[in-house]
Amino acid sequence: MRFGRLRLTSLFIAALGVAALSLAAVSAAKPGNGGPEKFRAQLAPVPHPGDDGGSNVTGRAKLHLRGDMLEVLLKARDLSAGLPHAMHIHGKNAGELAFCPGAGRADDLRDDGLIETAEGLADYGPVQVSFTTSGDTSMASRLALDRFPVAKNNGKVTYRRTLQIPSDIASNLDEKHIVIHGVDINGNGSYDAEPKSAGLKVPLEAELPVACGEIRPK
Ligand SMILES: [Ca+2]
Ligand SMILES: [Ca+2]
Ligand SMILES: [Cu+2]
């Protein structure tokens, strides 16, 4: 009897081992046989119900992920010309639903008809990656306007960089959003120091979200 019980136990352990092995095989296969995981994002204008200076920014991003190295190609148009535009991956904790903000967010902190970055946080979550042109790409660089891409005179911008992202963000990339910021509302060619944004002590024009899109597997 004792012998039989021992034998059952070892069979059970052996079965566990097989299960663990096949799980390992599945996760090893997931990143693809040498090729990158591919993602896309279509960026649509953030629907400020008030006067956003005619901002109607659209764009698209192609993302290739190899491990935690993310290759980004982002093109956007109708941005305020000659000005830097902060661009980020925004996201929440794994499994939490995230969205691009709707017009109803505009009065959350300040009822000015504009959706400030802080008013959209409940939807798209905080900054997790900064699409800077050089140096640091963490959320610490989220407002490093001297290192964000500058829109050409025709309002177009092309951003291309391969950056290392935290592995917990890489593993949930399809739950994230790309957000582009900055609009010269009064058309004077610069981001005015005043007014400041609700919730953030930075110029409103520099931080207003102007386009947003969900990252989806291709
Ligand atoms: Ca507002
Ligand atoms: Ca201005
Ligand atoms: Cu952002």
Image (spheres, grey):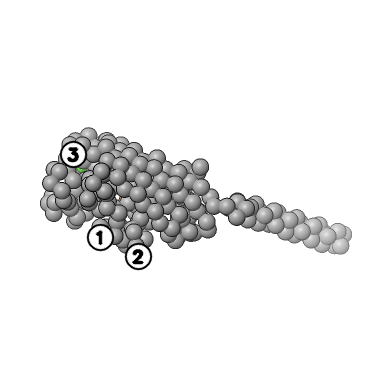
- Mark 3 and mark 1: Cα distance apart in space: 23 Å
Give 6 or 62, whichever is nearer the viewer: 62
Is residue 181 visible in the rendered structure shown here?
A: yes
At a point 69% along the width and 53% down the height, the residue shown is 22
Q: Where does label 2 land, which residue? A: 135
Q: Where does label 1 land, which residue? A: 146
At a point 45% along the width and 44% down the height, the residue shown is 40
In the figure, residue 136 lies in which quadrant?
bottom left
Sequence order check: which comes first, mark 3 or mark 1?
3
Is residue 113 visible in the rendered structure shown here?
A: no
Label ID, residue 53: 3
Q: Secondary structure at mark 1?
A: helix
Q: Position of residue 160 (x, y in %)?
A: 39, 53
User: Eyeballing the image, is 9 above or below 185?
Assistant: below
Q: Amino acid at mark 1?
A: Asp
Question: Residue 208 vs residue 27: left or right?
Answer: left
